[in-house]
Amino acid sequence: MDVNIVIRTYLLILAYGFSVGCVSVNLGQAKTEKSESVRFQVPPAPFSRFEPAGADQAWKNPNNGNLISYLSVCNDPADPGLEAMQAEMLAAFEDAQVVRSAERSFNGRRALNTEAEGLVDGVKTRLELLVFKKNNC
């Protein structure tokens, strides 16, 4: 084999290796905020407020374990649709089954009202979910 061909091939591979690169840009985490203007009516007794993980506010009924909570996300650059937000909430369920899902109007906005069943830590759980967008939240 000709030495010049081997050297040229090697230099060509080396030049290609230096010319092809990977650029990585760290855009950081998207900055979202909680809504400061949510208005709600506190659920009556026996519900009592507790500090939730991941929700803005939550109340629990100690008699049966039922929960009422809300979560607000504002100024999300991804701007997900109602169906995507619903899917994200249902992702916490194992074997999620949508029992009912329908569009409705809530607070003057299009909303998605869903009932679903599934397992959470092996416990059969039922959820009613209302997802809507208002004022960039």
Image: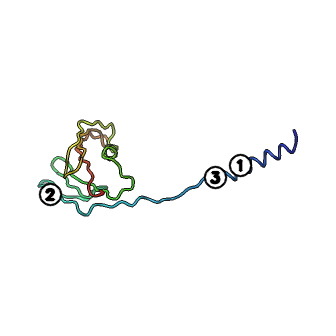
- Residue appearing at x 21%, y 50% in the figure: 67
Label 2 sits on residue: 41
SS for tag 3?
loop
Q: Amino acid at mark 2?
A: Gln
Q: Residue 64 shows which numbered tag?
A: none
SS for tag 1?
helix
Q: Quadrant of the C terminus?
A: bottom left
SS for tag 2?
loop
Label 3 sits on residue: 21
Q: Amino acid at mark 3?
A: Gly
Circles 1 and 2: CB atoms closer than 8 Å: no
Circles 1 and 3: CB atoms closer than 8 Å: no
Q: Residue 16 shows which numbered tag?
A: 1
Q: Earlier in the sequence, mark 1 or mark 3?
A: 1
Above/below status of 14 relative to 31: above
Q: CA distance from mark 1 to mark 3?
A: 9 Å
Label 2 crowd bin: few (<14), some (14–19), many (20+), radius 10 Å: few
Label 3 crowd bin: few (<14), some (14–19), many (20+), radius 10 Å: few
> Picture quarter containing residue 120?
top left
Image x and y of residue 56, in percent: 27, 58
- Which residue is farthest right? 2
Q: CA distance from mark 3 to mark 2?
A: 56 Å
> Picture quarter containing residue 48?
bottom left
